[in-house]
Amino acid sequence: MPDSLKGFDSETWKNDRYACNGQRQKLTGEFEKIRRELYGKKEYVVRNLLGKPDSESLLERNQRIYYYYLEPGSQCDDRSKLSEANWVEVRINPTGKVSEVTFKNPL
């Protein structure tokens, strides 16, 4: 884990899958501080820091988007569909590095 990301409460984030317990919502400000640090990091760094994504999309040319919910929503009842709750999108480029980190609804 890069030193610049070590201050983030990764365990609390990972333990609040789908943001149903409201813990990720409390970490949103903390996440915003490290968000730009994720650019250029390898996929395994993201997975070590944020855990398995709540959902993911496969794009052309081996690109992926990982979705991590930030607040409770309908995903807590039906995990098979994306809900309207706010989430973070982490885009992984074909070389396996983070190329973009955005919010569905900007903070």
Image (cartoon, helix red, strand yellow):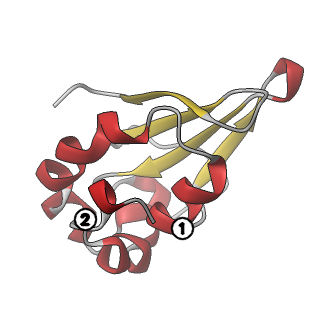
Residue 99 location in percent, x, y?
A: 55, 25
Tell me the distance, in whole angstroms, between the alpha carbons under discs 2 and 1: 12 Å
Q: Residue at x 31, y 33 (%)?
A: 36
Residue 26 location in percent, x, y?
A: 13, 63
Q: Which mark is residue 48?
A: 1
Residue 16 location in percent, x, y?
A: 37, 74
Tell me if residue 89 can be seen. Answer: yes
Where 93 sits versus 19, above or below? above
Label whose residue precedes the other's in the sequence (2 or 1): 2
Closer to the camera, 88 or 79?
Answer: 88
On-image quarter of the N terminus: bottom left
Q: Residue at x 46, y 51 (%)?
A: 68
On-image quarter of the C terminus: top left
Q: Secondary structure at mark 1?
A: helix
Q: Secondary structure at mark 2?
A: loop
**Mark 2 near mark 1, Cβ–Cβ under 8 Å?**
no
Q: Few, some or many C-alpha atoms within 10 Å of disc 2 (few <14, some 14-19, many ≥20)?
A: some
Count of numbered marks? 2
Q: Is residue 78 left or right of residue 19?
A: right
Q: Is residue 106 left or right of residue 15?
A: left
Residue furthest right in the image = 61
User: In this figure, which residue is indicated by the disc labeled 2?
Assistant: 8
Q: Which residue type does callout 2 highlight?
A: Phe
Tell me if residue 53 can be seen. Answer: no
Residue 106 location in percent, x, y?
A: 22, 25
Q: Which mark is residue 89?
A: none
Q: Which residue type does callout 1 highlight?
A: Asn
Q: Residue at x 40, y 37 (%)?
A: 84
Closer to the camera, 41 or 56?
Answer: 41
Quarter holding residue 64: top right
